[in-house]
């Protein structure tokens, strides 16, 4: 960097250096106005939020720290802000790259940087104190009262940066680094400016500025693929733009094809210059980790899904939660992992690819398979505990024992179970895929089993079909009749709910066959229960009633009162559909008594809904009370799937009573739930009902049990 001189001035600065008991006074220095900033970033785009945060941080304390992972654009943000505000610093700018994470070796020491700064401020080399305290004292004296900008780039720790902080509030200091230096915030009131990846809009704007609007607009599909491959990382986008600029004859589609394979993507994005090599940049952070931190990082890169909770990571690495938290905080501090939500951690996509490469070359204590098995066990056992809170009377299933070191999460309430399923749903699907790829057959179908009550309560019908199809693949070719009975039964349910009746009928017939093979009456009852539901949806009410009655007899024989109550509800539904309202009312009332005796609120809501339908068949006024009570219970329980159907029926009752505004409100709520649950036919039917209601045409439904 060239020093920009602007005149000379005489200064008398009294600085005391204690060096062997000798008091030294700093020499007079000619006036120097250093201009050390690297060139202004010419293709800077986006980062409006971070720029505003930096402005506010500087205004508050004069010291700001920009923190983020390698290649995230920390230095560019600092330079962009500095050049925007250059007029505020007439006394100059100082810049030093402290090489906190550098492949070349050790970071720069404060002594080296102070020596450089003092020279830049006009102090002759021979008159610079040899002691760091003396250098720091002289440095602070020279910048005191001056309006200067000081950029300390790529800082590793607080010891490296503290001697470089001026004592004068007239100076502005911006620090960049991958580690959050908590001591700076506590001791010097520094303000944090965190940096994450670019948004899709910002990434697109950056690529457009580098390549030009015409080239970007000409291949929109390829541009989208390039943006996905770079995952919002500015350094990766810069490499892509550089390759595209260097190859003007190549299409962006060709470049996107090179990046398509995740196994080779990092190699394609790497350049010969270590400063622009993604692998090199990531390696500098990785090399600074302890063995335990490195192992945790690598295992997180190998784990499936987008993010992991703190308890999940603890099981993955086989540590107590408290110890895992300490390790994760360090990884998050050096920006190798992110914490997008409290106690949920994720690894950036490109950093993950680097970690996977390293994992292939770095043996862990017991190999990654053991760690991943602990993770799958964590999800299986926690999911089973959550499922029991949602469906406490479900079929008994002996879950695979947990691997040593696995620590399932503790859930105590239905609300907590629903919240856990909501947070972990995508992760559970990814974990089941991992179990399937790994050949852990029992885990595959048992994970599906633990998810089915949640899927039904939230209306995730397509996901439910997908997990049970994997479960079906897992039990094919094995001699476990009990597992086959459950999987075929649940796959029949899943197909039936989506209207694929032929497949559903075949699977429930097979379920009955496998249930008989087990010799277990509970499995036989459950298989007949499923067959009744499927035949009912298929439209054969007589056959449905036959299976419902068979399930009811067995449930009574094995003394399972809640299952008996659900079977009574089915018998009542099919009897009502056949016109036997007296039988229907009797079975509903018997079921309601059982559910209330056992404090089963979901079962109570189910029967109230059935009583509402029965009342609709013989007169509407009584139905309102049943539907409204059922709806309150379903909403409290979070069962949005059943709530949507109850809302639709409530609307029908309001419509029959000429309460059109209330009918409209109920149907609109139901339609929103149907759309969310991808129940397109149901939503379209209601939309048609609403249009007819608006036009003043009498609406028509297929009867309360259709």
Image (tube, grey):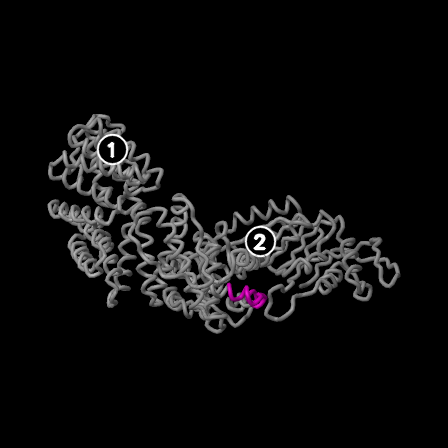
Q: Quadrant of residue 123?
A: bottom right
Q: Are marks 1 and 2 in contact (CB under 8 Å)?
A: no
Q: In the image, 184: left or right of 144?
A: left
Residue in view at x 42 percent, y 68 percent: 369
Where does label 1 land, which residue? Answer: 650
Question: Of tags 1 and 2, which is closer to the observer?
Answer: 1
Where does label 2 land, which residue? Answer: 80
Quadrant showing the C terminus: top left
Vertical comparison of 589 with 506: above or below: above
What whole-number distance in Å separates the C-alpha atoms at marks 1 and 2? 60 Å
Q: Earlier in the sequence, mark 1 or mark 2?
A: 2
Q: Residues within 10 Å of mark 1 (few under 14, many from 20)?
A: many
Q: Residues within 10 Å of mark 2 (few under 14, many from 20)?
A: many
Residue 393 seen by the camera: yes
The reply to whether the magenta stretch includes residue 288 is yes
The reply to whether the magenta stretch includes residue 49 is no
Vertical comparison of 656 with 201: above or below: above
Vertical comparison of 541 with 209: above or below: above
Q: In the image, 180: left or right of 529?
A: right
Residue 211 seen by the camera: no
* Image position, residue 205 (x, y; %): 45, 54
Vertical comparison of 222 with 684: above or below: below
Q: What is the magenta range?
A: 284-296
Main structural element of the magenta stretch: helix, strand or loop?
helix
- Look at the numbered disc 1 and give the secondary structure of its residue: helix
């Amino acid at each position: 960097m060239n020093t920009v001189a602007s005149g000379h001035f005489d200064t008398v600065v009294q600085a005391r250096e204690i060096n062997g008991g000798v008091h030294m006074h700093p020499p007079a220095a000619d006036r120097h106005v250093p201009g050390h900033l690297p060139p202004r970033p010419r293709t800077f785009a986006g980062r409006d939020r971070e720029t505003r945060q930096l402005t506010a941080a500087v205004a508050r304390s004069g010291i700001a720290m920009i923190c983020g992972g390698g290649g995230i654009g920390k230095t560019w943000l600092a330079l962009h802000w500095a050049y925007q505000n250059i007029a505020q610093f007439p006394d100059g700018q100082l810049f030093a790259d402290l090489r906190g994470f550098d492949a070349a070796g050790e970071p720069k020491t404060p002594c080296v940087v102070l020596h450089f700064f003092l020279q830049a401020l006009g102090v002759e080399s021979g008159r610079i104190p040899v002691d760091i305290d003396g250098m720091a004292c002289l440095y602070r004296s020279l910048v005191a009262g001056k309006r200067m900008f000081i950029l300390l780039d790529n800082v590793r720790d607080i010891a490296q940066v503290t001697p470089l902080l001026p004592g004068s509030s007239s100076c502005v200091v911006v620090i960049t680094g991958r580690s959050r230096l908590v001591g700076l915030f506590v001791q010097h009131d520094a303000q944090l400016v965190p940096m994450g990846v670019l948004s899709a809009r910002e990434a697109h704007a950056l690529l457009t500025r580098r390549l030009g609007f015409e080239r970007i607009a000409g291949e929109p599909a390829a541009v989208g693929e390039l943006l996905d491959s770079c995952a919002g990382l500015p350094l990766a986008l810069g490499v892509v733009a550089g390759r595209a600029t260097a190859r003007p004859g190549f299409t962006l589609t060709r470049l996107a094809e090179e990046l398509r394979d995740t196994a080779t993507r990092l190699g394609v994005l790497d350049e010969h210059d270590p400063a622009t090599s993604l692998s090199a940049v990531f390696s500098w952070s990785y090399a600074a980790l302890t063995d335990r931190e490195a192992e945790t990082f690598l295992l997180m890169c190998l784990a499936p899904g987008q993010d992991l909770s703190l308890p999940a990571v603890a099981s993955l690495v086989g540590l107590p939660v408290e110890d895992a938290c300490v390790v994760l905080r360090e990884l998050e501090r050096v920006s190798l992992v992110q914490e997008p939500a409290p106690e949920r951690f994720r690894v950036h996509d490109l950093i993950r690819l680097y970690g996977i490469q390293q994992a292939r070359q770095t043996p862990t204590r017991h190999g990654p398979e053991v760690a991943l098995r602990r993770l799958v066990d964590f999800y299986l056992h926690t999911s089973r505990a959550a499922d029991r809170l949602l469906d406490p009377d479900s079929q008994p299933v002996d879950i695979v024992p947990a691997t040593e070191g696995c620590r399932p999460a503790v859930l105590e309430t239905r609300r907590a179970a629903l919240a856990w399923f909501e947070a972990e749903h995508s992760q559970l699907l990814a974990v089941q895929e991992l179990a399937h790829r790994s050949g852990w057959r029992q885990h595959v179908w048992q994970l599906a089993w633990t998810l089915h009550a949640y899927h039904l309560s939230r209306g995730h019908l397509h996901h439910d079909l997908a997990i049970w199809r994997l479960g079906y693949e897992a039990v094919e070719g094995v001699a476990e009749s009990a597992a086959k009975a459950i999987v075929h039964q649940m796959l029949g349910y899943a197909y039936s709910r989506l209207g694929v009746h032929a497949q559903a009928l075949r699977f429930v017939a097979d379920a009955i066959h496998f249930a008989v093979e087990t010799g277990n009456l509970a499995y036989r009852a459950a298989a007949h229960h499923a067959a009744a539901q499927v035949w009912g949806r298929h439209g054969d009410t007589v056959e449905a009633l036959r299976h419902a009655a068979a399930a009811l007899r067995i449930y009574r024989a094995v003394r399972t009162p809640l299952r008996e109550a659900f079977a009574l509800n089915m018998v009542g539904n099919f009897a009502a559909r056949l016109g036997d309202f007296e039988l229907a009312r009797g079975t509903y009332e018997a079921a309601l008594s059982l559910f209330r005796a056992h404090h089963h609120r979901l079962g109570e809501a189910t029967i109230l809904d059935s009583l509402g339908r029965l009342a609709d068949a013989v007169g509407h006024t009584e139905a309102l009370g049943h539907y409204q009570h059922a709806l309150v219970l379903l909403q409290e329980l979070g069962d949005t799937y059943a709530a949507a159907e109850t809302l639709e029926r409530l609307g029908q009752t309001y419509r029959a009573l000429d309460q059109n505004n209330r009918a409209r409100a109920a149907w609109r709520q139901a339609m929103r739930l149907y759309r969310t649950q991808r129940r397109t036919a149901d939503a379209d039917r209601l939309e048609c009902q609403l249009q007819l209601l608006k036009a003043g045409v009498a609406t028509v439904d297929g009867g309360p049990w259709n």
